[in-house]
Amino acid sequence: MSVLDPVVELVRGLGTTLKMMFERPVTVQYPEEKRPVRPRFRGRHVLKRYDNGLEKCIGCSLCAAACPADAIFVEAGENTDERRFSPGERYASTYEINMIRCIFCGYCEDACPTEAIVLGDNYELSFFDRRSAIYTKDMLLESVASEEMLTPQKTEPGKYNRQSVPLMKNPQD
Ligand code: SF4
Ligand code: SF4
């Protein structure tokens, strides 16, 4: 080892520092600025609606059955044409996810026959007690563009009685 080696290393280090001074900073000014997430990112769940505002969830509990962490609780209620929440006979009168238990595996999303529960891109999950970690249906349900689209809705008699699960475009999918 030459006596000049430490000096060479020192100059190399200072060179790196100097080079970085002219690079664009990578600091993200969160929460004002949010980094976009990856396409397959699994964040906070969202309960989806159809375009007319009806809820996609039919209260079948398949998501709860598929959940390895036992984080989902679903209770079903009966739809009527006077008070309709979703197509078909039943809707979720209670839908809760315990975010402390959730491991964001996405099994609930895979199990859902109506694509009602979706893991979205929201990663802002914070709570200070166990009770606030339970996300209720009101918190999870997608917002609507206008008040007429809110559920329950009064619908045309018989129009939504039968088909609760949308027909598959391609049964091979
Ligand atoms: S993402 Fe996984 S752990 Fe979380 S609620 Fe869905 S199935 Fe359960
Ligand atoms: S989210 Fe999907 S799987 Fe879960 S209860 Fe609703 S329709 Fe069934």
Image: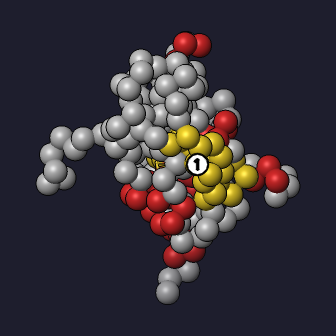
Residue 43, horizontal then vertical, whole percent: 54, 49
The residue at the point 61 percent across, 68 percent down is 70
Residue 7, horizontal then vertical, whole percent: 57, 69
Residues 40 and 91: in front is: 91
Residue 56, horizontal then vertical, whole percent: 45, 38
Residues 96 and 27: in front is: 96
Is residue 124 rendered to the left or right of residue 164?
Answer: right
Q: What color scheme is it?
A: secondary structure
The residue at the point 41 percent across, 53 percent down is 112
Question: Residue under circle 1?
Answer: 76
How many residues crowd around disc 1 within 10 Å: few (fewer than 14), some, or many (20 or more)?
A: some
The residue at the point 82 percent across, 53 percent down is 131
Is residue 125 rendered to the left or right of residue 35?
Answer: right
Q: Is residue 59 depicted above or below 161 in this figure?
A: below
Q: What element carries label 1?
A: strand
Q: Is residue 11 depicted above or below 24 in this figure?
A: below
Note whether residue 31 is visible.
Answer: yes
Q: Quadrant of residue 83?
A: top right
Q: Quadrant of residue 102?
A: bottom right
